[in-house]
Structure formats: structure tokens, C-alpha cells
Amino acid sequence: MKFNDLLRRTKSNLENLGWRLLTPFLQLYFNEKHFEELYKKKPDPWNYENYEFEKEKYQKTLELIPSDVQTIWEVGCSEGLFTQLLLSKGKEVFGVDISETALLRAQERFKDFGDKIHLQKLDITREDIDGTFDLVLASEILYYLGGKNILLPLEEKFYRHLRPGGYLLLCHFYPSGKIIHDIFRENNRFQEVSEKVTHHPHRDYIITLLKRQ
Ligand SMILES: C[S@@+](CC[C@H](N)C(=O)[O-])C[C@H]1O[C@@H](n2cnc3c(N)ncnc32)[C@H](O)[C@@H]1O
């Protein structure tokens, strides 16, 4: 094995171990206060707007959305950067986020999009919304929430809010993202449509598209 591959594999294993060890404590730290403070400190805290890496990741995620999808539940929509791309493709988006400040910025961004956009403040682990959608999108959010005890109830929630044959689109850093995405397959209610790991000099990531039975 080449040295670089060995280094990458070691880093991956350590990252997975770290995530598994931390899962019981994630909600103590990554709560509403944490995200609200982040957004209050500065807009676009992860610099999504100007980062080529994020633009490329958004594009790859966008390309996977099947053409028969019209309504999307975007979980953790932040200030609406990805939401904007969805709207520009003519989709109707129901965006939820735990941060009021992020949603106010999203609202400002979407002044001209009329009834194609619906925003709601919501903690996805504790609250629910109404409606059935063609696709649920969860990008760079699930690793903040916790382990199986939190993610399996979310699997049930996503299943319930999707029409039969609807899609679940997940995008997270790899390798912890692989463990997370696999949890959504455990109940055999979602079938894999595609899964791709992108190895990137900045960070590896995985995008998984699942279909509800
Ligand atoms: C890293 S950002 C990702 C934003 C967006 N999905 C993207 O990929 O560009 C994570 C977002 O999830 C939101 N979030 C974190 N925990 C949440 C929860 N329990 N319920 C709803 N939103 C949450 C945060 O406020 C933040 O906007």
C-alpha cells in the first residue's frame, strides 16, 4: 500500500472512532445556542458562498436530484444557499433550520420567490412538520445530531414525510458520512439508487441517494 493511502486510511479510521466516541455528547454541544451564536457572529459561517469546494459539492448533489422531483424538504437549510439552486431549478422547497438568524437571512434572500419557498424554524430531532414530499435533503447536518438513537427515529420521520417512491438525498463528510448514511438503510425501507465517495484534497465526502419503498 502506498504511504499516502495508508495515511488516508489511518486518518479515516481515527475520524470514525472520534465520531463514534463523541455521539452521546453531540447534542450537549451542537444545540440551538451553538448554531445561533455561530450565525450571529458572522453570516455564512462556513464560507459556503465563496468556497470552490462547496460549490463543486453543491453541483454534484444537485445533479443527482431525479427529474420527477418537485417538492423538497431541505433539513438544515441554513441561509438558503443550496436552497437557491433548488429554486432556480423550479423546485418547491420547504426549508427548516434550528437557527432563527439563518432563516431570517434566507427569508431576505428569497423575497422574490413567492410561494415556491416555505421556511420554518424547527429542531429536526424534537419537532415535526406537516406534509409529504418528493425528496428529503440532508446535507452536512446529520453528524451534529447524535448516534443511532437519534438517527433511527429520523429515518422513520423522513420515511413518513416521503411519498412512496420518494427520495432521500444525503451528503456528508467521508468516512463518518458512510456510517451515518448506512443507518438509513438499516430498516430496509430505503433502497440505494446511487452512492459516491469523492476524494478531495480539502475533505472527502459521500453523497447517497436512497429511494423509499
Ligand atoms: C453545516 S450547516 C449545513 C447547511 C446546508 N445544509 C448546506 O449543506 O449548505 C448545518 C445546518 O444545520 C442546522 N442544524 C443543526 N442542528 C439542527 C437541528 N437539530 N434541527 C434543524 N437544523 C439544525 C444548523 O443551524 C446549520 O444551519
Image (tube, grey):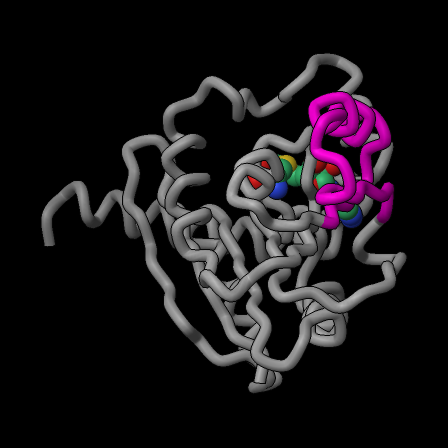
Q: How many marks are shown on the rendered structure? A: 0
Quadrant housing residue 86: top right
What residue is rendered at 47% in x and 57% in y? Answer: 65
Q: Give the range drawn in magenta.
A: 94-122
What residue is rendered at 37% in x and 35% in y? Answer: 56
**Which residue extends farthest top?**
42
Magenta stretch containing residue 111, yes or no?
A: yes
Q: Residue 58's spot in the image, x, y percent?
A: 45, 39
What residue is rendered at 37% in x and 68% in y? Answer: 194
88 in relation to 184, above or below: above
In the image: residue 123, left or right of residue 159: right
Q: Residue 35's spot in the image, x, y percent?
A: 77, 31
Q: Residue 62's spot in the image, x, y percent?
A: 45, 47
Q: In which quarter of the image is the N terminus?
A: bottom left
186 in relation to 17, above or below: below
Q: Closer to the camera, 65 or 180? A: 65
Residue 175 appears in the figure: yes
In the image: residue 27, left or right of residue 2: right
